[in-house]
Image: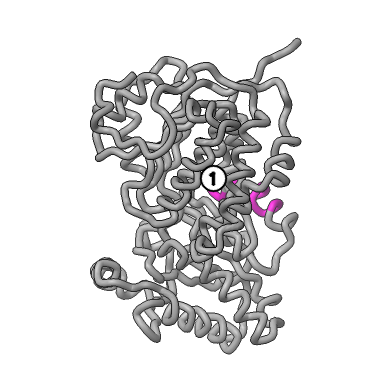
Amino acid sequence: MFKFKKELKIISGDLNLIKSPSEIFEKLTIDFLSTLSNKILNSAHLRIYSDLISFGFWCRKKNLIKIKESYEKNRLGRGIAFHICPSNVPMNFAFSMSLGLMSGNSNIIRLPSFQFDQVTELCVLINQILKKKKFISLKKKICLIKYDRSNKISEEISKVSDVRIVWGGDKTVQNFKKIITKPKCLDINFPNRYSFSIINSDKFKKLKPLQIKSLAKKFYLDTFTMDQNGCSSPKAIFWIKKTSKIAKEIFWNEIHKLAKESFDFNLPKTSKKYFELNRDIIKYRKKIQYHSKNFKVVRMNIKNLSDLNSLESIQPGLGVFAEKDIHNLKVLQNYITSRSQTMTYFGFEKEEIRNMIIKNRFQGIDRVVQIGNAFRMSNIWDGFDMINTLSREISLQ
């Protein structure tokens, strides 16, 4: 099928894929994913990988049936879907593969270039399941591959693709846009995005110390789980209205404590953080105040954001957080750009947030979840209904 087959490493499945599409939510697909879920959730040694456990929880049969019930039946996949997954987010490939299968497509998935133990563990389970007689036909609908960055290989796979899902950020998106595809090939691009949190100070200052620590732990998991590399991982907090300094310190002290105990801060991360922080300190020294009890957590108090190019351009991640007190939700419009993806929140009603986004016609914010749920996957992502977009509707009139 491909000239460069020797340069590809096939981890799971088969390159000789079925080209014809299937109906969405085929029973075999749901059974495959739910079997995968059971294996993940019943394997004690996998519990150390929180992102893998989250994926296992998401693809439970009960959840998949719930998703299925919200779609019309007269939909078919598009054919062959080529998934280009980010190198620094381990479980992205698993969600992307699952959405491709549920949408009725055969799938070629380029795995992360970095070596992640949870990716290896999941691929072992996928191979085990695909060997079963019941699921052997799915080997023609799944192909997990690795290859060194190569335009020639990407071009060849793109030629046979009916849809491409590009998760790799701005550079990767621009690179794949240059590749010639079938006239009807649909591209779904996920460029660099930026996420943040909002906290209702009126509700926050009423919390007891243990409740504040619980909220801080949820925020910590949203941010430090992937070193703030995930597009949905908050890099800033907006405190809405004035809050208690004592309560705020309890919150940040807990995050300092968790980072000190759990954050793997190695030499490459330290070097990157020092370099980028020092660069920004020199550039924005009169516009930002820096606070830190240890280098693992750094707070940037923004004095005047309007003088900066953009909030997302001044943070390296790795435990660096912009922080700003604002009067009300409406003021957020001064800080939201089309790159704003996920807004995690505490102390607000969903309807209040919805009205704020719709009324102010924000270009950004495609996702709103409570603090602690930043990595919760959904079939709706970055404003795309992935099932509908990866499939086509048969119009019956």
- Residue 329 against residue 391 in the figure, above or below: below
Please indicate, yes or no, whether residue 335 appears anywhere in the rendered image. no
At x 37%, y 72%, the residue is 264
Q: Residues within 10 Å of mark 1 (few under 14, many from 20)?
A: some
Q: Is residue 101 left or right of residue 142?
A: right
In which image quadrant can residue 363 be found? top right
222 in relation to 93, above or below: below
Residue located 30% across and 25% down the image: 155
Q: Which residue is mark 1?
A: 363
In this picture the colour scheme is one colour
Observer-nearest of 109 and 309? 109
Q: Is residue 355 magenta?
A: yes
Above or below, 206 relative to 35 = below
Residue at 51% over, 36% down: 130
Q: Which residues are magenta?
A: 354-365
From the viewer's side, name the closer residue of 201 and 190. Answer: 190
Which quadrant of the figure contains the C terminus? top right
What is the x, y in percent for residue 40?
56, 53
384 falls in the magenta region: no
